[in-house]
Image (tube, rainbow, N blue to C red):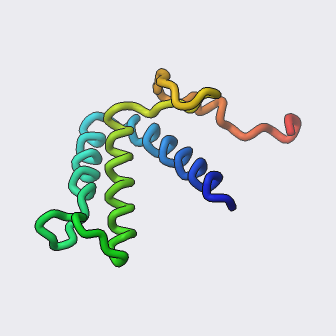
Amino acid sequence: MPATSLEGRLLAHRRILALLLGQLPKDQKQALLLWLSDRSILQDGQEDPGAVPAAEHAIGFALADEFRCLQRLIEDGVPDIGPSGIEPTDIGPPDIGSMAPPSDGQR
């Protein structure tokens, strides 16, 4: 799979996850945001975490970065991808009925 295809799939999953998590009740959302914030900086034992990147910390840095991205998307809202790129939209709850798989007669 080409890297651009993989990146697009990961971005789609991140946005779906952030949209779903953003629908949590306020107290649960605040607890989740605190949890994400606590994990958004890799504690690698350095005075300035991440100042000297090391291969053994690459996954940890990627996890911390993803937690930051999710936190930002949940706090700021999930942008929509339109034909011309990222465009802000109403991010209200998804219409779950429109996401149902088609019945056998509609395939």
Please name the residue shown 34% across and 78% down the image. 56
In percent of width and height, residue 44 lies at: 21, 71
User: What is the tally of numbered marks visible in this picture?
Assistant: 0
The extreme left residue here reads 47
Position above or below: 80 against 6? above
Position above or below: 70 against 25? below
The one nearer the camera, 104 or 73, is 73
In percent of width and height, residue 18 lies at: 43, 42
The answer to whether 31 appears left or right of 13 in the picture is left
The one nearer the camera, 86 or 103, is 86
Give the quarter of the figure containing the N terminus: bottom right
Q: Quadrant of residue 106?
A: top right
Position above or below: 3 against 24? below
Position above or below: 72 against 52? above
In percent of width and height, residue 53 lies at: 30, 69
The extreme bottom residue here reads 56
Please name the residue shown 61% across and 27% down the image. 84
Q: Quadrant of residue 28?
A: top left
Give the quarter of the figure containing the C terminus: top right
